[in-house]
Amino acid sequence: MATQEATGAFDVTLTPTGPADAAVSSMTFDKTFHGGLEATSVGQMLAVRNPANGSAGYVAMERVTGTLAGRHGSFALQQSGWMTRDGESLSVSIVPGSATGDLAGLSGTMEIAVRGGRHEYGLHYSLPD
């Protein structure tokens, strides 16, 4: 299977589900993807922040439903990220075996960037014939 790429932007709405001053904060989120992936998603996130030094870390799971490369279905994304004043790291992967419908067998990774307040993605994926 050849690796392909879908790019575009997404809108995201975050909704806190616990107290703002919790040791581990939690929230739900909804996204709408535009571009090579036309989809919506729902997810949950856990995060820890240290406002004193600007560091933070989070994990999230989300279910994406929509159309990719003319094929309709859903798949799960698993995210893990951290940031400090000196750098950041983000890993977003399609959960193996999570794809349904015409997307069954989908595998890959996603890159996310925020530029000028706009959320952009690059989905690097493989689909069986």
Image (cartoon, rainbow, N blue to C red):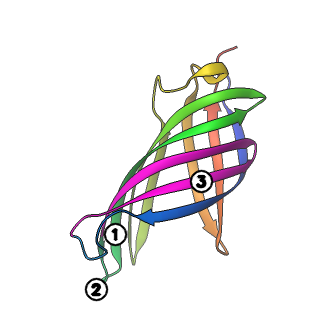
- 2 and 1 marks in contact (CB < 8 Å): no
Residue 56: image tag: 1
Residue 62 in picture, x, y percent from top left: 48, 44
Outermost residue toward the bottom in this view: 52
Residue drawn where x is 40% and y is 75% of the image: 86
Indicate the secondary structure of the residue bearing disc 2: loop
Marks 1 and 3, the one that precedes in the sequence: 3
Secondary-structure class at tag 1: strand
Q: Is residue 87 above or below residue 107?
A: below
Q: CA distance from mark 2 to mark 1?
A: 11 Å
6 vs 110, left or right, is right
Crowding near the residue tagged with mark 1, few <14, some 14–19, many ≥20 C-alpha atoms within 10 Å: some
From this view, report whether residue 89 is shown above or below residue 54. Answer: above
Say whether residue 18 is left or right of residue 80.
left
Task: Provide the secondary structure element on which disc 3 rests.
Answer: strand
Magenta range is 23-48
According to the image, label 2 marks what residue? 52
Main structural element of the magenta stretch: helix, strand or loop? strand
Q: Position of residue 116 (x, y in %)?
A: 67, 75
Is the N terminus in the top left, top right, bottom left or bottom right quadrant? top right
Identify the residue at horizontal 66%, vertical 30% (top origin): 3
The amino acid sitting under disc 2 is Ala
CA gap between label 1 and label 3 equals: 21 Å
Q: For mark 3, what is the residue?
A: 31
